Image (cartoon, grey):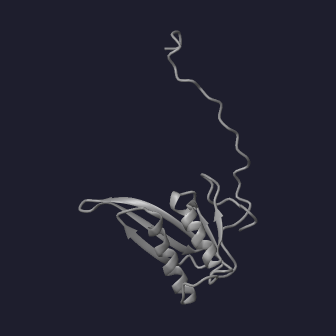
Amino acid sequence: MREHHLQPVNRPRRVRGNKAHDGRITTDRPDQMWGMDATSTVTTREGTAHIFIAVDHHTQECLGIHASKSAKTMEAFEPLRQAMRHSFGKYEPLTGIEITIRHDHGSQYISKLFQSELRFLGIESSPSYVREPQCKQSGVL
């Protein structure tokens, strides 16, 4: 294989910065930072199910959870709505003014629609770095 140049090209690995986690993702009080994420699983009857969740980084309490057959952005709103009603009793403009949402780069969370909803609620978006969700970004942690 080597003699005939049939081996795959070895590309040099990108050297990333220090992966040590200098910050923290827990907070000093409830309703300061919430984490949101989604996952999928396959059921024998219904097929793929997508599960969306919102968790408080201080209490580690599940504030909202939603399962659906589709993974559209609108489905990601439901745990957010549940969390707002759980913590503040309402879902109105600027209700979440002191909250930061930590999320990954899933298409639902970085979409214009979802980001617009966060601004409507007064919530700060804090996307994690790709493959490093514990990282410190934009002064949050």
Q: Tell me the residue at 25%/59% (across/down).
A: 44
Task: Residue at the far top: name it.
Answer: 3
Q: In which quarter of the image is the C terminus?
A: bottom right
Could you say which is closer to the camera, residue 116 or residue 22?
Answer: 116
Image coordinates for residue 112, horizontal then vertical, percent: 57, 63
Task: Residue at the far left: name it.
Answer: 45
Task: Residue at the far bottom: name it.
Answer: 89
* Residue 33: quadrant of the picture: bottom right
Q: Is residue 86 left or right of residue 40?
A: right
Image coordinates for residue 104, horizontal then vertical, percent: 57, 59
Could you say which is closer to the camera, residue 74 or residue 83?
Answer: 74
> On screen, 116 above or below 133?
below
> On screen, 92 above or below 100?
below
- Looking at the rendered structure, the number of numbered marks drawn on it comes to 0
Task: Residue at the far right: name it.
Answer: 139
Could you say which is closer to the camera, residue 92 or residue 140?
Answer: 92
Image coordinates for residue 88, horizontal then vertical, percent: 57, 88
Could you say which is closer to the camera, residue 112 or residue 19?
Answer: 112
Image coordinates for residue 3, horizontal then vertical, percent: 53, 9
Q: Tell me the residue at 70%/44% (across/down).
A: 16
Q: Is residue 105 left or right of residue 70?
A: right
> On screen, 96 above or below 101?
below
Q: Tell me the residue at 42%/66% (across/down).
A: 51
* Residue 138: quadrant of the picture: bottom right
